[in-house]
Amino acid sequence: LPLLLIFAIIIRVWIVQRYYFLGSDDAGYLGLAINLLETGQFSATDGSWPIYPPLYPIFSAAIYYLFGFIIDLPSKLNFVIFSGLLIVPIFLITLRLYNRKEAIIASVLTAIFPTLLLSQQGIWAAAEHMEIFFVWIGIYFLWSGLSLTQINQNSYVKELGFSSIFFALAYLAKPEGLLFWIVGIFFLLLIAIINSKRHCLGIFKNLLFMTFSFLLIVLPYWIIQYNNTGYFSISGKGLTAVAYGFIINQGGDIERAIYDGSRKILEAEIDSIGIFNYIINNKFLFIKHMVKNAEREFSLLFSMGVFPFYFLPFIGIGLFSNRWDKERLIKELFLLSLFIPMIVNMPFWIGERHLLVFIPIFIIW
């Protein structure tokens, strides 16, 4: 693993010297970092509460503080560190699910997979690299913890607490990280249902433990948000993403929507009555929107910028070259369930970089 890690880092250091690393969201994130250094406040330059979560701006501010104002240095180090370190959780989770040979193969593929290295979406991804890294460490601890709940049936499983902490860090990088924590809670509840009344006390303890661990990390951010805005919001970009989705699915253009004000107008309309009421009032439009988003997600998932469709035969070989048993079925269903956040994201605007977090599932398969 150390040699693979060095190999992955060297490749990424070579890449960052040859490509421009400021993507579409970087200006917003790095602006927050600069303002954080200058004022000590997590806020936009006009003093308003940011739509972006805090972890990547804090990371960027630390880089500027340590190394000086080199405009794209945080973006480059973010790519090198978190994209390179991704092989560690991929190795560990694959080793847990299968064996060492598969773990090494999955790590090598993660280190050199073209989309994670050279695609525009991969290079321009800002907080996504950070989110993906923390999500997959969380997934590793989640699987380890779920396995141990069958052994330590009435006690706390520390691995579940670690999984919640890393999912919380993923959430503070990108709000979508919250969805993977919810998947973990879903699995614990599923275990409780399967076991009926047996071990319910242990499951209940670990549900509280996971919730406490998650809140321990995110609650300070939520308190600061409430003190600055007077309200609580899970995602600052949720309204924007819904508005973008509606505009694109009705034939609009995302760049034009920024400059002609149509996005802001739609956001204000939705915000005035609430997303739920807007959906009820426009239910047929919303159904059409969801169908188009589902089509878009599926096509993007197997596009050249995410997981090219011509790799699919290798998944077939990986999945069906060996005989399945009950234990193997549970493992594959666990990996399959990690696509649940993709389904939950359907109401929102989806780009290729929002799907990069699912690439390791295909790589492991």
Image (cartoon, rainbow, N blue to C red):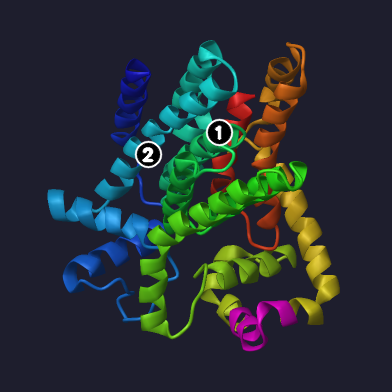
Rendered-image quadrant of the N terminus:
top left
Q: Amino acid at mark 1?
A: Leu
Q: Is residue 270 magenta?
A: yes
Residue 158 location, quadrant: top left
Residue 17: x and y, percent? 28, 34
Residue 175 position (above or below residue 334): below
Residue 349 location, quadrant: bottom right
Q: Which residues are magenta?
A: 266-277
Q: Amino acid at mark 2?
A: Phe
Residue at the disc numbered 2: 82
* Secondary element at image label 1: helix
Residue at image point 68% right, 48% down: 340
Residue at image point 39% right, 58% down: 217
* Secondary element at image label 2: helix
Q: Residues within 10 Å of mark 1 (few under 14, many from 20)?
A: some
Q: Residues within 10 Å of mark 2 (few under 14, many from 20)?
A: some
Q: Nearer the viewer, residue 69 or 97?
A: 97
Residue at image point 59% right, 23% down: 97
Residue at image point 31% right, 66% down: 32
